[in-house]
Each structure stands twice: as C-alpha cells, then as structure tokens.
Image (tube, rainbow, N blue to C red):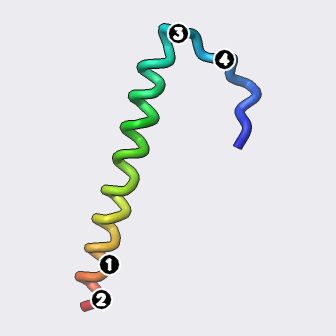
Amino acid sequence: MTITTLPPPAKTTTSPSLKFYIRILLSLPSVVCLYNLISIHLHR
C-alpha cells in the first residue's frame, strides 16, 4: 500500500503516529487470538 496523499511526517508528529501504529499492531494479534479461542470453543 502506497500513501501518496499524506505529506512526510514532521519530527513532532512521528512519535504519536508511531505510538498509534504500534497500538494497532499490538491490538490486532490479541483480537485474532480471542477470535480463534472463541471459534475453537464454539466448535467443540
């Protein structure tokens, strides 16, 4: 995916954006694990 509409982030906006992306990346595996556990529990 290439983002061409957004300008390059400044030094002051890199840390909040990085924290935001890291929070998303950390929340996705937990949601996937919960979904897998629920699906396995329902199938059994």
Which residue is under mark 3?
11
Looking at the rendered structure, the kind of residue marked 3 is Lys
Which residue is under mark 2?
43
| Label pair 3/1, CB-CB below 8 angstroms | no
Residue located at (42% from left, 30% from top): 20
Using residue 7 as the reference point, say whether residue 10 is left or right of it.
left
Residue located at (70% from left, 43% from top): 1
Looking at the rendered structure, the kind of residue marked 2 is His
The nearer-to-camera label among 3 and 2 is 3
Looking at the rendered structure, the kind of residue marked 4 is Pro
Residue located at (26% from left, 84% from top): 42
Q: CA distance from mark 4 to mark 2?
A: 47 Å
Q: Position of residue 41 (x, y in %)?
A: 23, 82
Residue 5, numbered label: none
Which residue is under mark 4?
8
Label 3: how many Cα within 10 Å (few below 14, some 14–19, many 20+) = few
Q: Quadrant of the C terminus?
A: bottom left
Q: CA distance from mark 3 to mark 1?
A: 43 Å
**Which element type, helix, strand or loop, lies under badge 3?**
helix
> To which quarter of the image does residue 43 belong?
bottom left
Q: Residue furthest bottom?
A: 44
Which residue is under mark 1?
39
Label 2: how many Cα within 10 Å (few below 14, some 14–19, many 20+) = few
Q: Position of residue 28 (x, y in %)?
A: 40, 52
Q: Earlier in the sequence, mark 4 or mark 2?
A: 4
Looking at the rendered structure, the kind of residue marked 1 is Ser
The nearer-to-camera label among 4 and 2 is 4
**Which element type, helix, strand or loop, lies under badge 4?**
loop
**Numbered label tally:** 4
Q: Earlier in the sequence, mark 3 or mark 2?
A: 3
